[in-house]
Amino acid sequence: MKINKMRSVKGEITVPGDKSISHRAVMLGALADGTTHISGFLKGADCLSTIDCFRKMGIDIEVDGNNVTVHGKGLHGLKKPSETLYTGNSGTTTRLLCGILSGQPFDTSITGDASICKRPMGRVTKPLSLMGADIENEYCPLHIHGKSLKGIEYNMTVASAQVKTALILAALYAEGDTIIHEIEKSRDHTEVMLSAMGADIEVDGLTIKVGKTEKLAPQDIVVPGDISSAAFFMVLGAVMPDSEITIKNVGINPTRTGIIDVFEDMGADMELVNKRSAAGEPVADIIIRSSKLKGTTIGGSVIPRLIDELPVIAVASVFAEGKTVIKDAEELKVKETNRIRAVVDEFKKCGIDITETDDGMIINGGKPIHGADFKTDGDHRMAMSLAILAQLADGDSTLDDSNCVDVSYPTFFEHFYGLEK
Ligand code: SPQ
């Protein structure tokens, strides 16, 4: 796909629903006793994989536009699927299912696409095994033999919401309390949703305590717009000349707003307006205007709060004056692609001054760049980031695969070109 150039952008968009919340709403809705109504659901490929897996376990799920109705059968109502569960490109589906399926009275197998088969699953299977789980393999396909589980106290070794959530979900089935200590605060949508559903869960800073839970109450879940999708338009609006974008209804849960902190540091012309709460999650509209960005250092506890936004933040830093250092971000290596290597390799094609480091990258911004033929390697976030990078490059650019945006943002290109002034 050739990336058509726009001179400036203006307008209003509503980004699709939050991917992390959409997954959790289906999973927890399936485990609740009764009907959960979800509005604002993200109909991206990853969340549709989650729906497909639960349908294969006997859960009746209706999809009508972005409204989803999940007829939950309770914590003990799943049935053994007759085939291997296929999770597509979705790390969240794969890892969270490990937590749920470890304590079921039946065996299951899970696999996904080529990217999923390369992503490490030992980070969930190992701590789950301490609870008594029996999972074969550390890469997909995984074979899960359902067992009785017991609570544990566990110090996390990576800042990962997926690992944390897998343990929390297994803990709902385990005898005795499970206590999890995070090393950094990661997204807490599972904890928020489970509390609302009446689970035995307490959060105190970085510590989460979960007891065996008999019943989850179904909910009406309103999914806010995904800040990880809004991030592309925050960067587009900031770097394009003579531009202004209003991004409506964006989830601003503090465990997700690292990009807002970084944009403030970089001097972005940005406003958060109309702050409100939607079904337990904070929401706002974000207004972003052309900005004179400056380089910054990004590392430490902010990393889990913006991990998925780092490729597009790297794009912003290309157009910022001075040096940007991204550090403590080794986790980028185990995403849909190695997102440190992918960003560095693709950015170098444009003549960008970028250096790969062990835990991130260093970018010297504010210099002219030229277009290139980009490879996405099927990574949705790389595709969208590179489309924005291409806007300010001299000459033409192409993307080898633009369909991968369907994973998290099927309407991305419609919104992107719809903003041309
Ligand atoms: O679901 P998947 O494939 O892992 O998706 C990604 C993404 O870029 O969309 C990561 F590749 O998001 C993860 C995120 O990086 C979604 C997620 C969640 O919903 O719990 C948590 C993060 O992963 P992790 O490993 O840090 O817990």
Image (cartoon, grey):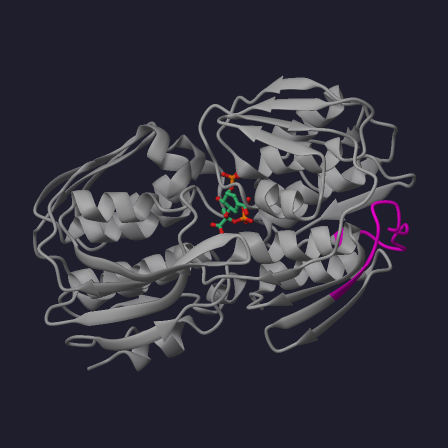
Q: Is residue 261 above or below residue 47?
A: above
- The answer to whether residue 40 is magenta is no
Q: Residue 13 or 363: which is nearer the viewer?
A: 13
Q: Residue 348 or 414: which is nearer the viewer?
A: 414
- Quarter of the image where the N terminus is located: bottom left
Q: Is residue 119 above or below residue 239?
A: above
Horizontally, is 290 left or right of 213 in the view?
A: left
Q: Give the range drawn in magenta.
A: 70-85
Horizontally, is 214 left or right of 186 in the view?
A: right
Q: At which x and y percent is residue 65? A: 61, 78
Residue that appears at 20% across and 77% down: 6
Residue 164 seen in the figure: yes
Q: At which x and y percent is residue 353? A: 15, 44
Q: At which x and y percent is residue 167? A: 67, 32
- The answer to whether residue 84 is magenta is yes
Q: At which x and y percent is residue 318? A: 17, 50
Horizontally, is 221 left or right of 304 in the view?
A: right
Q: Residue 75 or 359: which is nearer the viewer?
A: 75
Residue that appears at 26% across and 78% down: 11
What is the magenta segment's predominant secondary structure?
A: loop
Residue 372 seen in the figure: no
Q: In which quarter of the image is residue 88?
A: bottom right
- Quarter of the image where the C terminus is located: bottom left
Horizontally, is 150 left or right of 155 in the view?
A: right
Residue that appears at 47% across and 67% down: 16
In this rendering, the count of numbered labels is 0
Residue that appears at 48% across and 36% down: 186
